[in-house]
Image: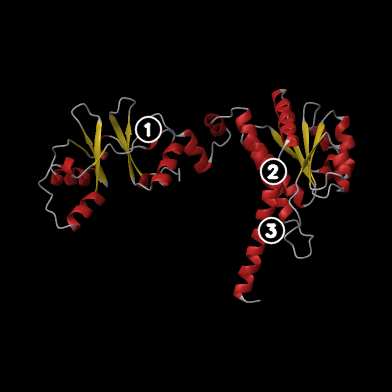
Amino acid sequence: MTSAEQIKRAREVFEVEIEGLKRTRDSLGDSFSRTIGLMLACVESGGKVVVTGVGKSLHVAEKTSAILASTGTCSIVLNPVQAMHGDLGMTGPRDLLLALSFSGESEELIRLVPAIRRHGLKVVALTGNPASTLARLSDVVLEIPCGPEACPFGMAPTNSTTATMAMGDALAMTMIDARKFDKASYALNHPAGAIGRALVLKVTDVMRTGDRVASVRPETTVLDTLLAMTAAQAGSAVVVDGTGRLAGIFTDGDFRRHVSEGRDILGCAVSAFMTAKPLSIRDDAYAADLLRVFEQRRIDDLPVCSEDGRVLGMVDIQDLPKMKVM
């Protein structure tokens, strides 16, 4: 198999799965809304969303349950085999079962559903076969009409698992909006790692202050501005007016650009070369908001200002890895 043939085959797999996602997206309707309604009733009554499946579907169930739990919808994974040997005790009448089976004929799930119903749970089937046994046993059928697998034998779960996982993501993200789950609540579920730090830390926790910020007035010469930047070990200087409000920013990139044009600017006022009214961020913003600005605007330095525009500090993108927020 040549390299070109390998790439061609890989692209075919992508196309099959992209098409499957489109089909599944376009099928969304009343059954999706009914599922969200059941999930809302479940969590609002103190219950949890129980997600189950067999084989590869169990792996998808684990991912779906994890994304639900991390975004405010209490959820657990139930192995259907273990459930029939005591783990049913983890469920209660206020819970809801999401049963994942593309064929809808997984023997373990078909045995599980009557038992789970005796515990008082309602059942939603995520299946590619709305006429299946699992579908008939369920309260709601959320169809996954993604089409054939990408596997050349039509057997290995590929297209179906991708579409089912996307459906789980759609449920979880819709629940975020439906329950008005906010960023602060998300942070409570992610206290560790870079995500947790970015969500918990405020801009004021990561910004430079005092002598680490090069702050100059508009009339300051470019030479003195560069000296201030050197003293602060900073790649930029904030330019503030007489009230301490942000007037502009001057970066080492600005200096290099003007010097490369053959201009002698060292004795000139920095206000002639600064970026006036630069982008800034409020002091009450989260580090996550800060990261978003850096990613979208491709900048290296960002002034931090109070509500009335006074400069409180500066964030240098080089500091963020040290703070373990990126």
Q: Which residue is mark 2?
A: 167
Closer mark to the observer between disc 2 and disc 1: 2
Query: Mark 1 or mark 3, which has the lower sequence index?
Result: 3
User: For residue 53, which quarter of the picture?
Assistant: top right
Question: Is mark 1 in CB contact (under 8 Å) with mark 3?
Answer: no
Give the residue at x 63% y 63%.
11
**Which amino acid does the dot numbered 1 rest on?**
Thr
Q: Please give left or right for residue 317 compared with residue 240 in the image.
A: right
Q: Note whether 319 is above or below 89 in the view shown.
A: below
Measured from the top left, where is residue 159 in percent x and y? Answer: 71, 55
**Which amino acid does the dot numbered 2 rest on?**
Met
Work out how far the residue at label 3 is from the one at label 2, CA to CA, in angstroms: 17 Å
Q: Which residue is mark 3?
A: 16
Measured from the top left, where is residue 82 in percent x and y? Answer: 83, 43
Q: Closer to the camera, 312 or 104?
A: 104
Q: Which colour style is shown?
A: secondary structure
Work out how far the residue at label 1 is from the one at label 3, CA to CA, in angstroms: 47 Å
Q: Note whether 101 is above or below 17 in the view shown.
A: above
**Which amino acid does the dot numbered 3 rest on?**
Val
Q: Please give left or right for residue 144 compared with residue 184 in the image.
A: right
Per the image, label 3 sits on a secondary structure element best described as helix
Considering every residue shown, the one lying at the far left of the view is 267
Query: Mark 2 or mark 1, which has the lower sequence index?
Result: 2
Q: Which residue is mark 1?
A: 204
Per the image, label 1 sits on a secondary structure element best described as helix
Measured from the top left, where is residue 66 in percent x and y? Answer: 66, 41
How many residues crowd around disc 2 within 10 Å: few (fewer than 14), some, or many (20 or more)?
many
